[in-house]
Image (tube, rainbow, N blue to C red):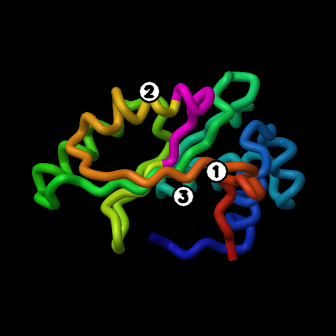
Amino acid sequence: MEMLDKISKKILMELQSDGRISNVELAARVNLSPAACLERVRKLHESGYIMGYTAQLNPQLLDVSLLVFIEVVLDRTTPEVFDAFKHSVQIIPEVLECHMVAGGFDYLVKARVKDMAAYREFLGKTLLQKGVRETHTYAVMEEVKNTTKLPIK
C-alpha cells in the first residue's frame, strides 16, 4: 500500500471521530476543496484504508449490558477443529470479536449478553457445543476505555 500523506491521515482521523461528517465539513477541516476531499476519500476506500462505516449503539438500551471475555481451549488443535470453531463463532450474534491467540489458550472471545443468566445459557447452549474443551470467563465490571479509533501517526 502507498504511504499516506498528512492530509490523508487527517481525513482518516476525522472520519474515525465522525463517520457521518459531510464532505463539505470534512473538506473544511482538512483544508481541501470539497471535490479534492471527496476524491481522497474515494481513494482511501479503494485502497482499503476505509473498510466501511457503522453506528455505535448503546448496549444498555439494547439489553445486552454484560460484556464478557472468554478464553477458549479446544478439544484438539487440528486444522479441521480450528476451521470448525472459526466458522461456528462467526454466526453467533452475541460474539463481537474472536481472536486466535498464542499462549495458554486457543481463542479469546468477546461477547455481549443481557446478564449472567443469559451468559450461562449462551455458554452451555452455544459456545460449548463447538469442540470446546475448556473456558475461562472474565466478566467486565467497568469499561474503562472502549474505542474503535486506530492510532494514526
Q: Based on the displayed image, in which of its 4 quarters is residue 71 positioned?
A: bottom left
In the picture provided, is 124 more to the left or to the right than 28? left
Specify which label sits upstream in the sequence, 2 or 1.
1
Distance CA(mark 2)–CA(mark 1): 44 Å
79 vs 18, nearest the viewer: 79
Evaluate whether residue 72 shows in this view: yes
Residue drawn at x 20%, y 44% is 131
Distance CA(mark 3)–CA(mark 2): 38 Å
Q: Is residue 152 above or below residue 13?
A: below
Residue 137 lies, in percent from the top left, at: 49, 50
Q: Given the image, on which type of amino acid does mark 1 rest?
A: Val
Q: Quadrant of the C terminus?
A: bottom right
Observer-side mark, 1 or 3, equals: 3
Under circle 2, the secondary element is helix
Residue drawn at x 80%, y 38% is 22
Residue 18 lies, in percent from the top left, at: 78, 45
Under circle 3, the secondary element is loop
Q: What span is colored magenta in the figure?
A: 110-118
Which residue has dot 3 on it? 49
Evaluate whether residue 36 shows in this view: no
In the picture provided, is 15 more to the left or to the right than 78? right
Q: Is residue 68 above or below residue 54?
A: below
Observer-side mark, 2 or 1, equals: 2
Q: Is residue 112 magenta?
A: yes
Which residue has dot 2 on it? 121
Which residue has dot 1 on it? 41
Q: Given the image, on which type of amino acid does mark 3 rest?
A: Tyr
Mark 3 burial class by Cα count in 10 Å: few <14, some 14-19, many 20+: some
Residue 100 lies, in percent from the top left, at: 34, 60
Residue drawn at x 76%, y 64% is 10
Mark 1 burial class by Cα count in 10 Å: few <14, some 14-19, many 20+: some
Q: Based on the displayed image, in which of its 4 quarters is residue 147 positioned?
A: bottom right
